[in-house]
Image (cartoon, grey):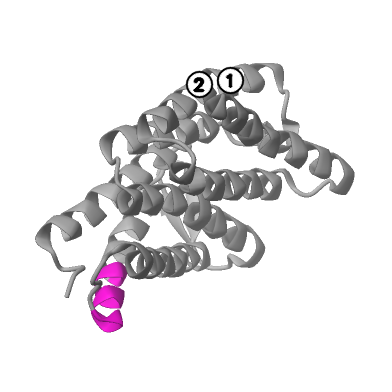
Amino acid sequence: MKFVLVTIAYGLIFVVLELVAANLRPPAEVARKIGHMLAGIAAALLPFVLDYKEIALLGALFVPAVLVSMKLQMFKSVHSVSRKTYGEVYFPLAICLSALLFPDQLLYSYAVLTLGVSDALASLVGVRFGRKKYKVRDGHKSYEGSIAFFVSTLLIGIGLVLWLVEDAADLAVVAIWSGILASALTVVEARGHKGVDNLYVPLAAAGLMGVLQILGVLHR
């Protein structure tokens, strides 16, 4: 019963977003990224109510649901972008794989928040303030957007480590290692192609954070 209620609540995020977007009519990319941000934050909170196998199942169920909604254009605020992208499909798949491969609150939360928050902020900042561009495989990205991704990922890393790691290292040590991870992930995100970064960025984030966890550098 709990799983069903959480699934319905998660789906309502997109229903509410669609209703709000229908009234406010924001740019399609803005509405899409706000949806990603809300979904990422909600996904990061799922371990408080579901176990990781249930989270993986939830993500897996949303993959065909997103494909159907894309086909029928059920959520135009999310799917109405000019370029061809499969980011909406990779998003729930990334949540599924993150829960299956990294059933640890630090690793999982770092993965989905990097996906949902950092990636979304990079796009929003790039669209609004991006002036200096650099070429990527399927177009251009902005340095301003990449900086936003780096800063967001850095802060997410610091916050999660200090919150979730018992006997966490000093703030300076945590900040240095979080900055190293954020730098690496910014490069990974910059190589995104047709939304596939929604899949490999969170997995890379969890994997790299897992390496630091194994090495013990996050602890005093």
Residue 168 image-quadrant placement:
bottom left
Q: Are dots 1 and 2 in contact, CB under 8 Å?
A: yes
Quadrant assignment for the C terminus: bottom left
On the picture, is 120 further left or further right than 12? left
Amino acid identity at mark 1: Ala
Instruction: Please tell me which residue is depicted at 21% across the width and 68% down the height of the picture.
Output: 218
Q: CA distance from mark 1 to mark 2?
A: 7 Å
Frontmost of labels 1 and 2 is: 2
Region in magenta: 170-179
Q: Is residue 66 magenta?
A: no
Rendering coords of residue 155 (x, y %): 43, 70
Residue 184 location in percent, x, y?
A: 28, 60
- Residue beneath label 1, please? 65
The answer to whether 166 appears left or right of 78 in the picture is left
Q: Residue at x 30, y 40 (%)?
A: 103
Position above or below: 104 against 126: above
Judged from this view, the residue extending furthest toward the left is 215
What residue is shown at x 43% (from left), y 54% (from top)? Answer: 114
Does residue 151 sit above or below 124 in this rendering? below
Question: Closer to the camera, 42 or 24?
Answer: 42
Label 1: element kind: helix
Residue drawn at (70%, 46%), measured in percent from left and top? Answer: 31
Pick the front one: 179 or 188: 179
Q: Is residue 122 left or right of residue 101?
A: right
The residue to which callout 2 is attached is 61
